[in-house]
Image (cartoon, helix red, strand yellow):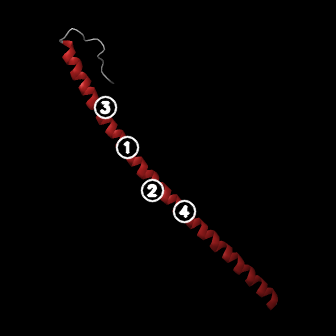
Amino acid sequence: MSEATASQVSAIAAAAEEQAGAVDDIARSTGEVNRLAARIVEGMHLSVESVRGLGEKFARLNTLIQSMCAGREGGKDSKGCMMLE
């Protein structure tokens, strides 16, 4: 009986070690996923800021083109002026 019990205890200990290793692997993988997600969020915030900046530049460019075309309307050559949409 003691030999069978010792064998069972040994098998349980081996299974527990294997499970502990799996838990450690899962924890490492979860941490890596969290770090990657944080980097993706940071990249998305930077992209939003870049797009916002482009929108502001587009608006300034459109205003400049409008003022240039307005100046040409009084002159002889007004062709080639168009508004950006």
Left or right? Give the position of 77 relative to 2. Answer: left
Foreground mark, 3 or 4? 3
- In the current view of this chain or complex, which residue is farthest to the bottom? 2
Looking at the image, tell me whether mark 1 or mark 3 is earlier in sequence order: 1
From the top left corner, tell me how far across and down residue 84 is, in percent: 32, 23
Residues packed near mark 3 inside 10 Å, few (<14), some (14 to 19) or many (20 plus) = some
**28 or 60, nearer to the observer:** 60
Label 1 vs label 2: CA separation?
15 Å
Foreground mark, 2 or 3? 3
Label 4 vs label 2: CA separation?
12 Å
Looking at the image, tell me whether mark 1 or mark 4 is earlier in sequence order: 4
Q: Are marks 4 and 2 in contact (CB under 8 Å)?
A: no
Quadrant housing residue 49: top left
Residue at the spot of label 2 = 38
Residue at the spot of label 3 = 58
The amino acid type of the residue labelled 2 equals Ala
Quadrant housing residue 50: top left
The amino acid type of the residue labelled 4 equals Thr
From the top left corner, tell me how far across and down residue 71 is, in percent: 19, 17
Residue at the spot of label 4 = 30
